[in-house]
Image (tube, grey):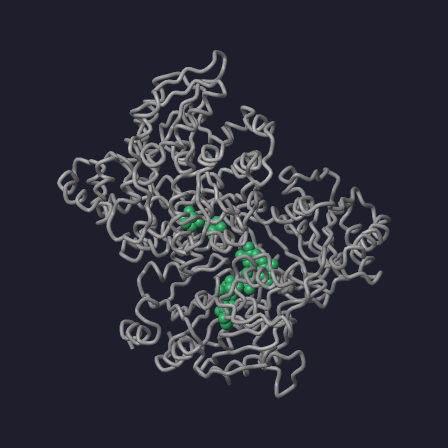
Amino acid sequence: MVRNKTLKDFEEVIRKCVKCGVCQAHCPPYLVKKREGAVARGKIALAAAVLDGETGIEKRLQEDISLCLMCGSCVKKCPNKVPTDGIIGAMRREITDRNGLPVMAKLLAGTIGSARMKNTLSKGAAFLRPLWSRKIPQSSGLHLRFGLPGMENRTVPEPAFSNLFDRVPEFSEGQPGRPVVGFFAGCSITYIYPEIGEMMVDILVRMGCSVFLPKNQGCCGIPALSSGHGKLVEELADNNIEVFAGKKVDWIVTACGSCNGGIGEYYRTLEGADRSFTDKVVDFSVFLEKEGFLEKLLEQKRTADPVKVTYHDPCHLKTQGITREPRDLLRALPYVDFVEMEDADACCGLGGTFSLYHYDVSKAVGARKLRGLEESGAEYVATTCPGCVMQLQDTINHAGLKVRAVHILELLLRMAPD
Amino acid sequence: MDITAVVKRLEAIVGADNVSAAKSDRITHSYDATQQKHLPDVVVYAASVNEVAQVVQLANEVEMPVLPRGAGSGFTGGSLPVYGGIVLVLSRMDRILDIDTENLTAEVEPGVVTATLQREVERLGLFYPPDPASKEFCTLGGNVAECAGGPRCVKYGVTRDYILGLEVVTPTGDIITTGGKTLKNVAGYDLTRLFVGSEGTLGIVTKIIVKLLPKPAAKKTMLVLFKTIDGAARSVSAIIGAKIIPTTLEFLDGATIDCIRGKSSIDLPENCRAALIVEVDGDEDLLDRQMARIREIIEPSGTLAVKVAATDDESEQIWQVRRIVSPSLKQISPDKFNEDIVVPRSKVPDMIRELEKISSEYGVSIVNFGHAGDGNIHVNIMVDLKEEGMKEKVEIVLDRVFGAAVALRGSISGEHGIGTAKMNYLHMELDAATIDYMRRIKTALDPKNILNPGKIFLEKSSGESA
Ligand SMILES: Cc1cc2nc3c(=O)[nH]c(=O)nc-3n(C[C@H](O)[C@H](O)[C@H](O)COP(=O)(O)OP(=O)(O)OC[C@H]3O[C@@H](n4cnc5c(N)ncnc54)[C@H](O)[C@@H]3O)c2cc1C
Ligand code: SF4
Ligand code: SF4
């Protein structure tokens, strides 16, 4: 049984903030709102004030605490490595513990099937896109991210006709002596982009790996974490850790930056989480490089007129320092002319359930990518997180640019010569 | 007038969304980088000069202090409401209004972040030199108010040297303009210079016209390790003596190097007791010759190693050494007093010797680094305030440090300002008549002591209006 850290558990690191203000340069909501309450420093001051009993959980405080993408950008640049993303998670749980779930999350809690909220389920579900609620199970974080009203302008892809579990067997046998790889697919890949998941399994098998795709794996928990639903995070984590224990795997590969941050980085912070699970979590780009996939790509003849592709850093990989491997993968693709863009590592604006509560801020955060995208001259912006793909495409659509947002594996699939 | 009535009237000026007297907003506007804490009564976000003027007029009417605030990155408490009042945040006034490539000027609102302006002008081949270490988040309004400096000041000067003109809301709520768009301008008093460095006590800057330079074609960075601090100091004098003005001349003393050893990709051996980072900029072909010349000059001063960066990456590695200093200091002691004294640059060795003496005399560790090229030394007194009698000891040590700087004809602050943090020491540097002259300016312009009270000068019990 795992347990989220409480606000109290963070007390010591909260006091480590020296109020230097460095985080202002890196916090996406602050760069849009330009208000101290939106930046890491401000939110930490509020967390400290709550701990000290200087203030209660008043409305304005809740608004400020809701203004966080949990992207971790501030943590990476903070001279004292104050884990604001984790602190915000704890603050949101503190708020829901004291006040109950906020209205939006209440509807959502219904969709996730918490007993207390069963009654809201039917009402909540009525708002959901019909196709979404039919195709995507109630336990999926996708509902938390995209499934609510008030976002009519958002362009969200429809779920795929059949999901990944229907397309790929639970176990694909590889060559003896080669690694056994668990594949944590995550909600987006399972239900919206199953072809990315198929591609992933296909590549892994072709490299001789055996692939284990447990069908009862669930949501990584990032959307629940982001909405302060601590109990749900714990339930999801317990389940995921358990189902992967069903087979002896050497690695647990993800092809979604958020899921990687969730089942790897976040689970690591849970009290009682099994390190033998979290230590195996690896992003596909890192794994492919380690297994010599790049060399194979580089052996291929380069095409005469390659397409220009640039790369967007998903926050959850950037903060773990995974920035080179996906780029090297793109560079190795024989039909890709890789170009860097300005602000490649700026957040797309999705941030768990952030865009649900703050669609305008989320859009403004996303819009900060446009200049770099346009000036790069790229036809495709590739990334390693389906959430970013959706958010980037939404931003691009609103701006009327011609660029297409894709997952790196989609590029492999779409453009592979055979 | 009670606060709800003031809030109502403020809302009428800037809109309800831009005023808050909620506890959480008061908390998030109660600090800056000094970690002192003073709660304001109300927080206001201004969007235009007219709004600023009306807020100040209202404040005069109800006699409430107004505290201009940029990014709150100040090191001396300048933006803090020591008597409560209205914190007036200018971060949302962040438009670059004009970049004039013919006259090499730019016109900006005060909330523009320094590095943002730098990036935008550099896209056009231009250059705004002042580069405080906080440039990625501090505002130009704050830079003007504190006359911010940075490593590049050796060659290019400080904020003051780049401000051509200002639009200012006076402490009584009038809107005035100073200077203009021209390099030459002697119409009337030089009010621009009066406002630069006035720490938000004489007016609120709402527009800034800055001077730009052509962007230097290239730069080269060198790291030199020395066996003694004297060797490093002699090198600085020798470089300047040879009539070479590098872009930057940063030094780290032995204690600083001990703090960062093993944390950078560059090896810093045990017997390295000082280091210099030298950077030159200009035309590419000139740089190699300049670097060679500098090597020649410093080699006799007992260098351990000289590393000239061949690539941008290597140059980045060298700067990394400098950048990890501040965060690393935290690890030697729980409390740190960071002072930014300045002495004439030829006196840097004397000052360092004096600091070593003070350190051993009082048994507290003092870590020094900073801008050797302009004599600006960041003196860090590392202590644990929980130790008995330490607070009093620190006070004596600070007294000695400032005293030594002033005795060498230096100043108690090179770039961070006085604010609340150094009020007690101002008299060590300025005589009574000079302080009185400054006070008379303040009183004449701000009769009700509305604008940023309780800063720079020890209060004579006026201004406790809130
Ligand atoms: C990590 C770090 C590194 C730093 N490095 C340097 C450095 O290398 N060199 C250096 O000089 N400083 C440095 N500083 C100090 C600080 O960044 C500068 O003093 C900066 O100019 C403050 O800008 P700000 O926008 O944060 O102003 P604030 O802190 O918000 O305010 C500072 C003062 O300016 C006044 N003010 C702000 N805006 C206006 C306005 N529009 N009109 C009138 N008054 C105004 C305020 O009332 C206050 O008195 C550093 C600070 C940090 C935290
Ligand atoms: S960068 Fe870190 S220490 Fe500095 S203000 Fe932000 S959270 Fe605090
Ligand atoms: S996690 Fe991201 S959004 Fe949240 S405070 Fe840090 S930088 Fe800002």
As drawn, A12 above or below B408: above
In-front residue for pair A40/B409: A40
**Residue at point 60%, 34% (across, down):** A302
Residue B407 appears left or right of B180: right
Q: How many marks?
A: 0
**Residue placed at 32% from the left, 45% from the top?**
A156
**In the displayed structure image, the side of residue B379 where residue B26 appears, left or right:** left
Residue B287 location in percent, x, y? 79, 55
Vertical position of residue B317 compared to residue A137: above or below: below
Residue that protrudes farthest toward the top in the picture: A176
Q: In screen coordinates, is B71 left or right of B337?
A: left
Closer-to-camera residue (B153/A188): A188
Q: Residue furthest bottom?
A: B188
The outermost residue toward the left is: A119
Q: Depth check: give the residue in front, A294 or B171.
A: A294
Quadrant of the drawing holding the C terminus of chain B: bottom left
Image height of A46 relative to B92, above or below: above
Figure quadrant of the N terminus of chain B = bottom left
Residue A125 visible somewhere in the drawing: yes
Residue B421 visible within the image: no
Where is residue B398 drawn, in percent x and y? 61, 59
